[in-house]
Amino acid sequence: MGVTLPQSDPQGRPEHYLEGFRNRHGLEESGVEGNVVTLVVNPNIVPAVLATARECLQIMHLSYITVVDRVGSFELTYELLDLRGVSVRVKTAIEGEEPVIDTVTGIYPTANWHEREAYDMFGVAFKGHPDMRRVYMWQDHFDHHPLLKSFEISTKRTFEGLR
Amino acid sequence: MGVMQKFNEPNIITTSTDKLFNWARKNSLWPLQFGLACCAIEMMSTGMAHNDLDRFGAGFFPASPRQSDVMIVSGTVTTKMAERMTRLYEQMPEPKWVIAMGACAISGGPFLDGYSVLMGADRVIPVDVYVPGCPPRPEALIFGVMTLQKKVERDQQVGYEKPRPALVTEDGEFLEYLPEREYGGISEGKAPRFENIRPLKRTYVFEREGMPVAAQTDVGWVPEKKHAEQGGGQEEPASPKGSKDYSAKKPESKDES
C-alpha cells in the first residue's frame, strides 16, 4: 500500500485537518493551538473519528492513549501524529466507575497494546479488542488496577497478599 | 590451608573434609549472571579490572544457574520478577548462597510503596548476606563476598543439624517443631490463592480466541447487549474498511460496519 506523507511545511495543515473532522462529525469542542489540533468528542464516535483520521486525512500514526481517572469519570486522550509535525489530540470522557469504550484496533493496529495497557492500569474495557489480557501486571492473583485513584497499597503488605 | 610452601620431604597435609571442601568452595564462588537494576552496573564494575572480583575467585559470572554458586540479587525485585528469581534460585545446584545487594533487594528501598515491588528478596528466597547501599560501592560488594566466604568457611557437611525453630516451654522443654517456610511451588505459578484478598469488583468477561488455555487465566469480557446496541453505529465510520481485519475474525461482534 502506498503511503503519502504530507510535505514538510505544516503551514495550514492543522486547519485542514480540523475542517476535515468538522465536516464529518459532531464535535463538542475543537481548536488549533500551534501545530496541535484538539478535539473533544462523544465516546461513542471515537472509532468513527479515528477512522476519518486514518482513512480520509491519511494520519498514519497513533502515538499513545492516555487515561486520567477523574473519580467518577475517565478522560481518554488519543494522540495522533501525521509524522510531519502536526499532531491531533482526540479527547473524550467516559462517565461511570466502570468505563467501556469501543476499540480502535481495527483502525490503528498499534492500539492493541495501548488499550491493553489502559485496561491494565485503569480497567478501561475496550469493547471488541481481540486479545484483552494484562500487559504489565501479572495475570494470576492480581485483581487490581493500580493507577486508579481508589487503589491503595499498604507497606505492611506481604508477598502473598499482593499476589 | 592456603599457604603455599615448598617442602623437601613428600608433602602431606592433614585436614578435615569440612575444611577441604569449604576451602574449595569459598575460593570459587561463581555468581550467577543476573542483574536487575542499577545495582547490576556496580556489580559489573566490581567484576571489571579495576576492582577485580577474580581475586576472590568470584569473577566468573556464568550465564546459567546450573553452574552458579551465588546469586547476587542486584536491584529492585518486582513481584513479577520474583517468580523468575525464585525459579532461577531453584535451578541452582546445592550448595548455593544469596547476596542481597542494595536497599531494594533488602527491603524494597525507595520503591517500597510501589504496587509492583517486592519488599525484599528474602521474602521469597533465603538470603545469606545483605549489602546495604543505594547502590553499594564495589568495595561494599567485595566486602559482602568476603563476608560470604567467611560464612562458607563455617559450613559443616558432616554431623550438621540445621537449627529449626521450635516451640518450647518456659523451662526450655521441647514441645514441637514449627513448620518450615516453604519456598517451593512459587516459580511454577501454582501458589495457592490466599485468603483475605478482596476480589475485583469488575465482572467483565473478556472473550478471546486462539489463545492457549493456560493463558486464559483472566476472565475476559463479553460485550453486554446494551453496550452492543449503544456502541453500534451511532455514527458510521467515515470509511467502513477501517475495521476489516478484526471483523473477519469475530463476526459475532461485528456491529459497526
Image: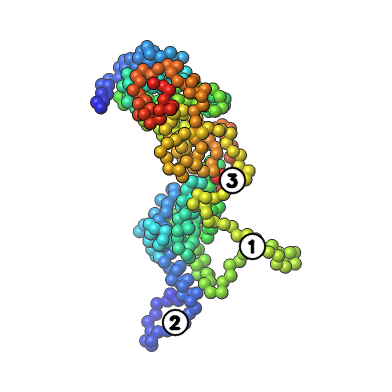
Q: CA distance from mark 3 to mark 1?
A: 24 Å
Position of residue A143 in the picture relative to residue A91 (left or right): right
Instruction: Provide the chain ID for the residue under circle 2.
Output: B
Q: Where residue B22 sits in the image (x, y, percent)?
A: 47, 71
Q: Amino acid at mark 2?
A: Ile
Q: Where residue B130 sits in the image (x, y, percent)?
A: 52, 57
**Residue B136 appears in the figure:** no
Say which residue appears at 51% left-offset and 26% top-offset. Answer: B224
Q: Amino acid at mark 1?
A: Pro
* Pointer 3 residue: A161
Which quarter of the rendered picture does the N terminus of chain B lie within?
A: bottom left
Position of residue A61 in the picture relative to residue A137 (left or right): left
* Pointer 1 residue: B165
Q: Amino acid at mark 3?
A: Gly
| Quarter holding residue A77 | top left
Q: CA distance from mark 2 to mark 3?
A: 54 Å
Say which residue appears at 52% left-offset and 72% top-offset. Answer: B157
Asked which secondary structure carries label 3, the reply is helix
* Pointer 2 residue: B13
Farthest right residue in view: B171
Neighbor class of circle 3 (other Cα within 10 Å; few <14, some 14-19, many 20+) is some
